[in-house]
Amino acid sequence: MKKHIVVFFACCVVLALIFIQLKDPYAIEKSNSLQGMSWSHWFGTDYLGRDLFSRTFYGSFYSLLLAICSLFGVVLVSLILGGISGLVGGLVDSSITTIADIMISIPSLILTLVFTGFFSNSIFTVMAALIISWSGKYIRYIRNLVLNIRKEEFIILAPLRGSYGKHTLFYHIIPNIIAELLSLFLTDIGKIILSISGLSFLGIGVQPPTPELGTILFDGKAYFFVAPWIFIFPGIILSAIVLITQFISSKIRKRWGIAYD
């Protein structure tokens, strides 16, 4: 108990220091450009004199938010299509699985380039491309979960209690696959963040001056030999986010005995 209190207190102190240190991530001070680490600028400054710690902090939050929103879209689409595919079967099942296979076969980068060619180069375009390209994997995964849980006695007997179709799906099946979905969700958040940051690094999606980890890395690569901190610190934070989400996911899988390919 004392250990938990100490950890909680330490986390509160760290968070307080972070929020005290945060500055406007858009504020330009060219007189402070390319400054190294200091008490006033923990991660130094970039070529425009903007505080790199604040930009990295907000960029991490922005990247994580975009990844979560994209994956929520993926899960929503996949729960509907994967659930219908597993419950109904037959021609509907084969049609949906074919669509899912097509989605899986299209790389998100190519799909994003096509989307930005036809539509505007915005984060919403990137999110739409990510949702389409990632939904195939989730549709198949949810379909397989539904097929497995359909064999359980409480699902077989559900019609005797007046539960049919969507009622069975939303009230009996989905609550019993939440743990598996949460584990996969956390595993893929890191991958989605890498995808979003990679696309931003290539100049697709999030555009400067918005502080997103990919755009910060893109700005920093030109100054790598002059001011390496612009590239190194955001890269470390990006790697840490991916590793933390993977660690949490592995703990959930271990806790509930979940295994998937």
Image (cartoon, rainbow, N blue to C red):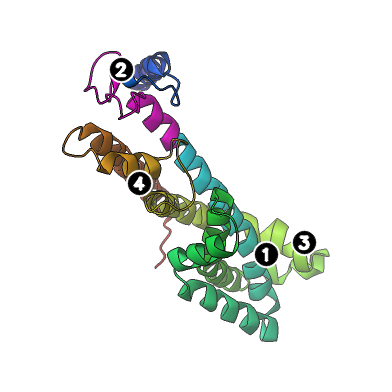
Dot 3 lies on which element? helix
Disc 1 element: helix
Verify CB contact (< 8 Å) between mark 1 and mark 2. Answer: no
User: Mark 2 packing: few (<14 Cα in 10 Å), some, or many (20+)?
Assistant: few
Q: Give the label, 1 or 2, closer to the camera.
A: 2
The secondary structure type at the circle numbered 2 is: helix
Q: Type of residue at label 4?
A: Val
Residue located 30% across and 17% down the image:
31
Which label sits on residue 80?
Answer: 1
In the rendered structure, which segment of residues is drawn in magenta? 32-60
Which mark is nearer the camera, 4 or 1?
4
Q: Is residue 33 magenta?
A: yes
User: Disc 4 on helix, strand or loop?
Assistant: helix
Q: Residue at position x 76%, y 64% from top?
A: 166
Q: Main secondary structure of the magenta part?
A: loop
Q: Find residue 167 and name its label.
A: 3
Q: Is residue 116 left or right of residue 49?
A: right
Mark 2: amino acid: Ser
User: Mark 3 is on which residue type?
Assistant: His
Question: Alpha-carbon distance for marks 2 and 3?
Answer: 63 Å
Give the residue type at disc 1: Ile
Q: Nearer the viewer, residue 67 or 177?
A: 67
For marks 1 and 3, give the one nearer the viewer.
1
Image quarter for residue 50? top left
Q: Earlier in the sequence, mark 1 or mark 2?
A: 2
